[in-house]
Image (cartoon, rainbow, N blue to C red):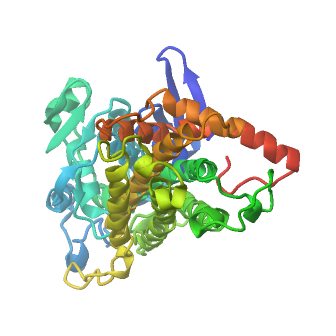
């Protein structure tokens, strides 16, 4: 996407141009963070206008097309009079705004809106340029709808979340902006000089059919998984050093070691972490396609002047990929918790019990390890695939669904658990090194130790552990551990002529 960015000095803003073909997971996450404004490419605008002309011709010629002049789902055979076509679209949005639960965060709602705009930019939906530009203006002003996180079964796409997204743009329901906070949608829009959407024929269904909620959450999940997987290798290496393990199993021994072999959570790090990395890379490739796919129904083919009702809205691809992601990345935490157990258990580590002096008076890392165990256990349940379930909806018209929304939400929870479990291992490994001084580890691992000590001091007596875990978690979320170790890793790989890793940029 780099060649699609340009800087507008007068606004001191970076614009990311969307064309429906080039968006990647990393840039979508950056859009969620508010780092870019967006606009459409000239080519995308042309395709959008051509598709809209097809819809206008259909209406003018009184041709019957699903979702343009018929009802929806079970009502697909109900013909709607021409003077009711705009009311049809507005009613669709209102009735489908049936989600429950807390709203998506500001960042996730930005991602959802940006991704929907990107899909519309492909020019297969028949939504007018006027409506898409109104969505772009709302995004750039950070006017964001209230979107409850629950209510989608993932086919016909994420109907309820996308209906809520559209409802706010219509000036109904609630919206958020930096200036107003949460307020009535019409008030928020007017505060920013924006006009509520008035939906044209076909535009309601054109805005809500698709996999954008599950896919936008998936983008965050996979990008966070990339970050934590990179750093899991480094943290595991710290634990290996603290436990005085052997590197012979890695066919790369750099020192004499009398130990014949270590436990699997040390000896099998390359094998288990390796498949987690490959899993993340596979899921990322699936999402790269999904983010740039036309997921509407019906699809509009301007070059042939026709519409086709299909099933691109079905969320099976992202749902299956997200279930796979949760299973794959969970193993990083499963291994990490066992290494933490070895660090705190004196019979396994030959270190002070629970990594603290004056044991008994002090409990040290005793309950921090319990927290890691609790998170791993919870994630085991979350790793049960949601996409193996399906419930028939819409009077058996939509008789197989993906449950991709739940797959996305639980994958995010699993990734967060992995981050937290590894944060605990990072703290434990650094604490263990304190008991091995004056011995030193490798330069990159010492740099990681120094980094941790900038936010968490050594554990010499009991204190509240939660702030330390949160500080270490923040280091991982911001990929600081990766940043300090990567230059040394790159030098080593270059020296040996090693291939790039699956998750390398």
Q: Quadrant of the N terminus?
A: top right
**Residue at horizontal 16 percent and vertical 41 percent from the top:** 174
- Give the side of residue 235 with respect to residue 30, left or right: right
Toward which corner of the image does residue 481 lie, by quadrant?
top right
**Residue at horizontal 46 percent and vertical 48 percent from the top:** 352
Is residue 43 depicted above or below 402 in this figure?
above
In the image, 2 versus 228, the foreground residue is 228
In the image, 40 versus 470, the foreground residue is 470
**Residue at horizontal 44 percent and vertical 29 percent from the top:** 457
Say whether residue 383 is visible.
yes
The location of residue 44, given as percent across then percent down, is 54, 46
The location of residue 29, given as percent across then percent down, is 46, 43
- Give the side of residue 270 with respect to residue 373, left or right: right
The location of residue 111, given as percent across then percent down, is 40, 45
The location of residue 286, given as percent across then percent down, is 55, 64
Q: Tell how many labels.
A: 0
Toward which corner of the image does residue 487 lie, by quadrant?
top right
In the image, 164 versus 62, the foreground residue is 164
Is residue 418 depicted above or below 442 in this figure?
below
């Amino acid at each position: 996407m780099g060649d699609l960015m340009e800087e507008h000095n007068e606004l001191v803003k970076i614009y990311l141009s969307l064309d429906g073909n080039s968006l990647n997971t990393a840039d979508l996450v950056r859009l969620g963070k508010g780092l870019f404004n967006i606009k459409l490419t000239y080519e995308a605008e042309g395709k959008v206008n051509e598709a809209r002309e097809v819809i206008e011709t259909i209406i003018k010629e009184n041709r019957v097309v699903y979702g343009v002049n018929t009802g929806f789902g079970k009502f697909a055979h109900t013909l709607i009079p021409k003077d009711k076509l705009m009311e049809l679209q507005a009613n669709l949005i209102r009735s489908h705004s049936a989600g429950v639960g807390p709203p998506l965060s500001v960042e996730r709602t930005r991602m959802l809106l940006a991704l929907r705009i990107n899909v519309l930019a492909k020019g297969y939906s028949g939504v007018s340029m006027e409506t898409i530009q109104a969505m772009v203006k709302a995004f750039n002003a950070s006017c964001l709808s209230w979107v409850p996180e629950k209510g989608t079964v993932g086919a016909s796409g994420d109907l309820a979340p996308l209906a809520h997204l559209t409802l706010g743009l219509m000036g109904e329901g609630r919206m958020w902006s930096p200036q107003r906070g949460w307020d009535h949608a019409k008030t928020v829009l007017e505060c920013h000089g924006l006009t509520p959407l008035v939906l044209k024929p076909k535009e309601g269904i054109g805005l809500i059919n698709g996999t954008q909620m599950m896919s936008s959450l998936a983008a965050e999940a996979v990008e966070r998984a990339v970050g934590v997987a990179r750093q899991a290798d480094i943290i595991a290496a710290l634990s290996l050093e603290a436990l005085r393990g052997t590197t012979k199993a890695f066919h790369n021994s750099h020192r004499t070691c009398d130990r014949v072999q270590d436990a699997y959570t040390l000896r099998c790090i390359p094998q288990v972490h390796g498949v987690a990395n490959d899993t993340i890379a596979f899921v990322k490739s699936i999402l790269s396609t999904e983010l740039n796919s036309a997921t509407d129904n019906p699809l509009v083919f301007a070059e042939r002047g026709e519409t086709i009702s299909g099933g691109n809205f079905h969320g099976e691809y992202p749902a299956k990929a997200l279930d796979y992601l949760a299973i794959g990345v969970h193993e990083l935490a499963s291994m990490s918790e066992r290494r933490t157990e070895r660090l705190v258990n004196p019979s396994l580590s030959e270190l002070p019990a629970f990594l603290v002096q004056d044991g008994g008076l002090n409990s040290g890392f005793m309950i921090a390890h319990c927290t890691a165990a609790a998170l791993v256990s919870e994630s085991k349940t979350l790793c049960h695939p949601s996409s193996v379930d399906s419930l028939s909806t819409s009077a058996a018209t939509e008789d197989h669904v993906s449950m991709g929304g739940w797959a996305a939400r639980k994958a995010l929870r699993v990734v967060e658990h992995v981050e937290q479990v590894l944060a605990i291992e990072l703290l434990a490994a650094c604490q263990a090194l304190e008991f091995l001084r004056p011995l030193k580890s490798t330069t990159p691992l010492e740099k990681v130790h120094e980094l941790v000590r900038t936010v968490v001091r050594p554990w010499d007596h009991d204190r509240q552990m939660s702030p330390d875990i949160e500080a270490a978690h923040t280091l991982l979320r911001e990929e600081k551990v990766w940043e300090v170790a990567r230059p040394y890793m790159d030098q080593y790989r270059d020296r040996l002529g090693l291939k790039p890793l699956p998750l390398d940029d």
